[in-house]
Amino acid sequence: MKPAARMPPDEAAGVKYILMDIDDTLTRDGKLLASAYNALWKLREAGLKVIPVTGRPAGWCDLIAREWPADGVIGENGALAFWEEDRPGTGRLRTLKAEYHPNAVKNDHPLLGRVKERAFAEFPQLRMAKDQFARLFDMALDFAEEDPVLPLSAAERVRAIAAEEGAMAKVSSIHINIWIGNYDKLSMAERFLSRRFGWKSGEEDRQVVFVGDSPNDEPMFARFPLACAVANVQRYGNLIRHLPAYTASKECGDGFAEIAETILSKRK
């Protein structure tokens, strides 16, 4: 990974879409940093499309699409996308739109129950994420959002259990997200960019910057040539085989703000 400051100006000038993870990319210790939120506004006011891509639930994504400076949000690791559109003839009134990945399966499937039973049997201190009530498609198991914090090795073992049962699973900085259906952050991001904005895969890959921090961001890191990470990506060592092209010198939301400022300054 190269320092974000070394992104060439001509590359920054061609960027049209800024995609980013939320937890430990925009936040620190669970709180959205002022520096990161301010950066989102600056990016949008500069004419860039701002799209969070997160493992967080549908309920959170409803709020984000309505109240953040965002042009859409992808949630539950790619199960859904929410965005707002103007209501014709109504002035400032807007309506929330939604798209669900065609492979997404509701999270009441018994397979997820088997994964949960096995995971809790091996790791009794594991628990359901507190935001599970707001989820439609995935099951989120908390290993590091609240105490007690379990080691990454435990999260990786739970991911392996899910795979053994035939489910998909990704490890974030706080949760193990488990779902049924062949999709991820990347497949929904490509689908959303194409259908919503007319983005052309292959031809316009360098128009996209994704910023992330953890193993569940790896498909995005591998796909987009201008992908970036905040400095805390270093915590995951060899759990991420495909690292992004650039990294911030700062962690969490301050690192995101650093990347955003770098892109904006080089575009000038």
Image: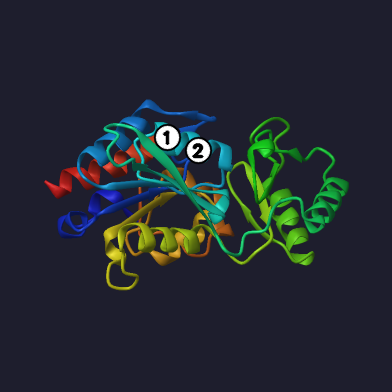
Q: Quadrant of the N terminus?
A: bottom left
Residue 74 against residue 64 in the figure, above or below: below
**Image height of 265 relative to 130, above or below:** below
Q: Position of residue 195 (x, y in %)?
A: 38, 62
Q: Quadrant of residue 109?
A: bottom right
Mark number for residue 62?
2
Q: Residue at x 30, y 39 (%)?
A: 258
Residue 183 location (% of width, % of height): 57, 63
Q: Which x, y percent locates residue 170? A: 62, 55
The reply to whether the C-beta atoms of the residues labelled 2 and 1 are less than 8 Å apart is yes
Pick whichever, 134 or 26, lies toward us: 134
Q: Position of residue 171 (x, y in %)?
A: 62, 52
Does the image show residue 243?
Answer: no
Q: Residue furthest left?
A: 268
Residue 70 visible, this angle: yes
Q: 2 or 208: nearer the eye?
A: 208
- Distance from Cα at disc 2 to Cα at disc 1: 6 Å
User: Mark 1 — residue?
Assistant: 66
Q: Dot 1: few (<14), some (14–19), or many (≥20) neighbours within 10 Å?
A: some
Label 2 element class: helix
Please tell me how many numbered marks the rendered image carries: 2
Q: Residue at x 64, y 43 (%)?
A: 135
Q: Residue at x 34, y 36 (%)?
A: 69
Identity, as a three-letter code, of the amino acid under mark 1? Arg
Three-letter code, disc 2? Asp
Residue 247 lies left or right of residue 163; in this view the side is: left
Would you say 124 lies left or right of 67 here?
right
| Residue at disc 1, secondary structure | helix
Taking the view exactly as shown, the residue that stands out farthest to the right is: 121
